[in-house]
Amino acid sequence: MKNKNLPDNAIEISRLSKEYKGVGGAKNLLALNSIDLKIPRGSMFGLLGPNGAGKSTFINILAGLTVKTSGKAVVWGFDLDKNPRSVRASLGVVPQEIYVDPFFSPKETLHQQAGMYGVLPKDRNVDFLLKTLDLEDKADSYTRTLSGGMKRRLLVAKSMVHRPPILILDEPTAGVDIELRQQLWTYIRKLNEYGTTIILTTHYLEEAEELCDTIAIVDNGKIVRCAPTQEILNDADSKSLIVKPMDGLKDLNPALKEMGAIIDKDDNIIIGYNPKNETSRDILRKVEESGLSVRDFSVSGASLETVFLSITSKK
Ligand code: ADP
């Protein structure tokens, strides 16, 4: 949405590089190699890449924890070189490791953090955050009595006390079981619906696929692909049409065999196709023309995993 008071892009990066100096004769390491990136305001943006790709380096530069070697970073309209404090105020960063002081309650933890950012008590959104992240019931309990999932949510709340328009999560669900992961996603989505631009790094493909509207694939310090998630998924050159025949089927007719169809263990007919050349409708029409009565059908898309492997292996 256009709004003349707000930047169109939450983050704009141009030719950003980071070279770590080798110590004791070791070679220098180019962790970020002249990357360009625009992250639209309001998006749910995923930086996806294998370990060592450069994701944390990128985030640490924005968060002011690592100094870039060259290039430009503009966060919420503020240039990192000219206005580092405004950049910092525009970002909430949720670290990977869970550390919360065990002897304070969630409410106290959030008030303390707000104090550190100089947010006056009357301007604090502590109660809103406790409610949004479902921590109200535990607001006054010792933090050490919180479950792992609640502690993670408290870290998210902590990073939001100064009302940053951008929230960065570094591997938010590393080592978290699937149920907790889903739960955390729900809260992250909620914050996004309230208008926060979300940036997350992950090496879980399904996390990026499930959560992000746009994905940048990072490999070896470079952005190798950046596009809406659906577009990246459409890159894949293999999809399958799964057809349930009306009547039981013992054998495939010659036309189906010609199309490379196979029968799976549940007696479904599976036909692989390249979505760049044909649509699922084309395939379905051919199946019906072969004389088969179709009871039901579905399309299975390529997974991000397939796309990811094909992109990162083309180095
Ligand atoms: P990711 O977060 O994608 O796993 P990182 O940004 O942590 O990747 O690392 C990118 C590369 O930079 C890796 O090769 C890593 O070993 C190297 N690196 C990261 N931090 C430092 C550092 N402080 N000093 C030297 N090399 C580093």
Image (cartoon, rainbow, N blue to C red):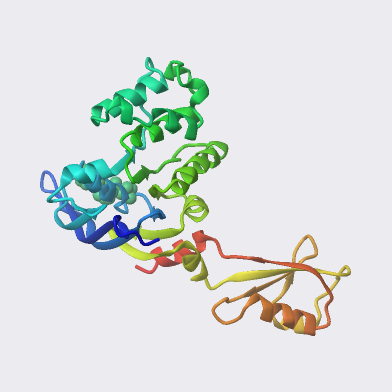
Which residue is depicted at the point 34% across and 33% down?
161
Q: Nearer the viewer, residue 64 or 270?
A: 64
Q: From this viewpoint, is residue 201 visible?
A: yes
Total labels: the figure holds 0
Residue 14, image x, y percentages:
22, 62
Residue 62, image x, y percentages:
24, 48
Which residue is depicted at the point 36% across and 49% down?
51
Image vertical order of residue 167 relative to residue 295, above or below: above
Which residue is depicted at the point 18% across and 58% down?
72
Residue 56, image x, y percentages:
30, 47
Which residue is depicted at the point 32% across and 40% down?
93
Would residue 162 appear left or right of 148 to someone viewing this image? left
Identify the image quadrant of the C terminus.
bottom left
Image vertical order of residue 63 relative to residue 308, above or below: above
Where is residue 100, by image quadrant?
A: top left
Q: From this viewpoint, is residue 100 visible?
A: no
Q: Nearer the viewer, residue 270 or 79?
A: 79
Image vertical order of residue 186 relative to residue 17, above or below: above
Residue 242, image x, y percentages:
71, 68
Where is residue 169, by image quadrant?
A: top left
Where is residue 152, by image quadrant?
A: top left
Would residue 91 appear left or right of 243 to someone viewing this image? left
Would residue 14 appear left or right of 44 to someone viewing this image? left
Identify the image quadrant of the N terminus.
bottom left
